[in-house]
Image (cartoon, rainbow, N blue to C red):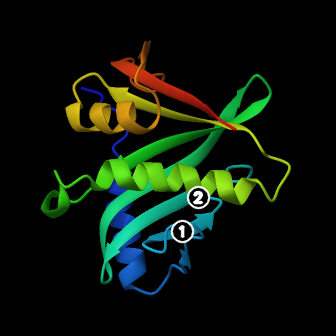
C-alpha cells in the first residue's frame, strides 16, 4: 500500500550527515536556536533545512523544497519531523514558525519578497495537522496526494 512522503526519513539522513561532518550549518538570523542548511538536491530545486539541536542531536527538523508557483509566486513545500524523544513539547510548531520567519527575513534581501508555504498532510497525521494549522493555515483544503492518491489536507499561506 502506498504511503505519503515521511520527512522523518530525511531527518534521519540529515542527522547522520551532521554527525559525519558532511553538513555546514548557519545560525538563524532571527532565532539563534535555529540552524539552516541550504542545498540543491536536483537541478533547479532549492532545499532549505531548518533544525533545532540538542548538542549535535536534531530535536526538530523542517525541510522546505521549491514546488512550483501560485499566482506567479514560488511555493515552498514544508515537511516537519521530530524524534520521538522530543515529541509533545511544541518543537514542531516552534520550528515551523521559526523556519517561515527565517525564510521571510532571508528572502527580503532578494527579489522574492512574497512566496507561499504549503504543507500536504495525511488526513491521519494528527500531530502534523495540529502543527500545520497553528503555523501555516487554520483552514486546510481537502486534496488527494499526487504521489500516492491518498486523501490529504493542503495547508497554504501567502507570506508577505
Q: In which quarter of the image is the N terminus?
A: top left
Residue 44 in view of the camera: yes
Q: In this view, does 122 lie above or below 98?
A: above
Number of numbered tags placed on the structure image:
2
Residue 29 falls in which quadrant of the image?
A: bottom right
Residue 113 is situated, as x and y percent measured from the top left of the image, at 78, 44
Which residue is more in the foreground, 96 or 58? Answer: 96
Which residue is more in the foreground, 93 or 69? Answer: 93
- Relative placement, left or right, of 143 versus 30 is left
Element type at marker 2?
helix
Residue 102 badge: 2
Which residue is more in the foreground, 127 or 28? Answer: 28
Which residue is more in the foreground, 9 or 116? Answer: 116
Residue 18 falls in which quadrant of the image?
A: bottom left
The residue at 42%/72% (across/down) is 33
The residue at 28%/21% (across/down) is 123
Of labels 1 and 2, earlier in sequence is 1
Residues under numbered marks 1 and 2 in contact, where contact means CB atoms less than 8 Å apart: yes
Residue 129 is situated, as x and y percent measured from the top left of the image, at 30, 31
Question: Which residue is labeled 1 in the image?
Answer: 36
Element type at marker 1?
strand
Amino acid at each position: 500500500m502506498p504511503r505519503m512522503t515521511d520527512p522523518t526519513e530525511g531527518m534521519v539522513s540529515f542527522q547522520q550527515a551532521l554527525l559525519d561532518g558532511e553538513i555546514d550549518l548557519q545560525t538563524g538570523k532571527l532565532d539563534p536556536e535555529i540552524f539552516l542548511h541550504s542545498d540543491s538536491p536536483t537541478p533547479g530545486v532549492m532545499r532549505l533545512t531548518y533544525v533545532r539541536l540538542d548538542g549535535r542531536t536534531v530535536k526538530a527538523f523542517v525541510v522546505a523544497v521549491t514546488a512550483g508557483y501560485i499566482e506567479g509566486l514560488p511555493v515552498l513545500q514544508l515537511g516537519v519531523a521530530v524524534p520521538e524523544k522530543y515529541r509533545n513539547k511544541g518543537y514542531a510548531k516552534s520550528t515551523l514558525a521559526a523556519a517561515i520567519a527565517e525564510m521571510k527575513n532571508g528572502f527580503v534581501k532578494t527579489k522574492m519578497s512574497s512566496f507561499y508555504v504549503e504543507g500536504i498532510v495525511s488526513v491521519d497525521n494528527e500531530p502534523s495537522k495540529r502543527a500545520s494549522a497553528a503555523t501555516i493555515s487554520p483552514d486546510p483544503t481537502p486534496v488527494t496526494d499526487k504521489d500516492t492518491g491518498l486523501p490529504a489536507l493542503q495547508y497554504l499561506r501567502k507570506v508577505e
